[in-house]
Image (cartoon, rainbow, N blue to C red):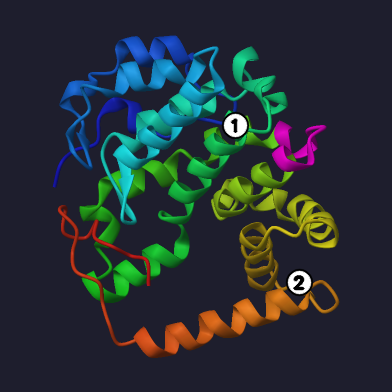
Amino acid sequence: MISSPNWTESPQVDDLPHFQDLLDSTDWASLVTAYGRGENLPAMLARLLDPDPGVRLAAANDAFRTVNDQNTIYEAAVPVALYVAAILNHPVIATGYADPPLHRPTLVTLLDGLSDTAYDADDQRVAIGERHFGEGFLDDYWEMRAFRDLRPALFSAIHPLLSHESVGIRDAALAAAVPLVEHPALSVHRGELVEHARGLLVASPDNYYRELVLDAMKAWGQDISGLENADDVAARELRARHLAEHCSVWPGNGPSGPGGDLSL
């Protein structure tokens, strides 16, 4: 088992490092990614603050694909997540939601990337891992454990965006916040997220976000009757059929053993 570096120790809420300090002080070339080592990450992450929204979008997609591929969380995912959280309120990012329609807002893309990584490290993934690899699953998969330890710090950066003036930003922030509040220190925020979720389900046609918040509300014991629409019900039934068809299939291990594909 590899010992986690110092920057993986649990930051406290509101204790995010400055993005430039993190960029300069991290030994990126030593960190494992989906494609080798992270020597290209500093330039990639710096492009997240490029004035050109197209450059920012490409950099965001490349960064998350590099550190979180096929449901495997790689070593470099931890500092990348910290860097992304630290720039969410940067002027280039914070005003980028008004980018021309041709470009997806960088802020939404970054929030979706954090959300995807958080879901790949959520309690369900841990339960699946423990079922197949034993109770020591997280002991051997320190990359996932380190990301899970970051959840309060990440949430502290995302939380203000739940009240953003843009509906699209609010919905993306909610989707990113939901898996983070599984952390025991954040459970007090679930009631607040339920209220945001009800608002999303009343107004949003986005099937992806609707699925995430409906699943969360059910897990939290909330009554979702009257909140599901016909598309939600059809999607839920389709997922149930797919799960029934594949429940006996366990995906192959990833390059790090327990850090394999936990998408089932």
Magenta span includes 13: no
Dot 2 alpha-carbon crowd within 10 angstroms: few under 14, some 14 to 19, many 20 or more: few
> Is residue 167 one of those drawn in magenta?
yes
- Seen at 65% across and 82% down, the residue is 234
Which quadrant is home to the C terminus? bottom left
**In the image, is residue 11 above or below residue 242?**
above
The residue identified by callout 1 is 103
Q: Name the side, left or right, on which 233 lies relative to 249.
A: right
Residue type at mark 2 is: Gln
Residue 238 location (% of width, % of height): 55, 83
Q: Answer left or right for 161 relative to 246.
A: right
On screen, residue 104 versus residue 135, left or right, reads right
Look at the numbered disc 1 and give the secondary structure of its residue.
Answer: loop
For residue 45, what is the image quadrant?
Answer: top left
Using the numbered discs, state the Cα–Cα distance from disc 1 to disc 2 in whole angstroms.
Answer: 36 Å
Given residues 29 and 53, the one toward you in this image is 53
Q: Position of residue 68 (x, y in %)?
A: 34, 45
First along the sequence among labels 1 and 2: 1
Residue 235: image location, x then y, percent? 61, 77
- State whether residue 242 is above or below residue 92: below
Mark 1 or 2: in front is 1
Q: What is the residue that sits farthest to the front in this orientation?
A: 102
Q: Which residue is drawn at 50% across and 15% down?
A: 49
Q: Nearer the viewer, residue 177 or 3?
A: 177
Main SS, magenta region, reads helix
Instruction: Say the numbered circle drawn on residue 222.
Output: 2
Using the rendered view, name the quadrant where residue 163 is placed. Answer: top right
Range of residues picked out in magenta: 160-169
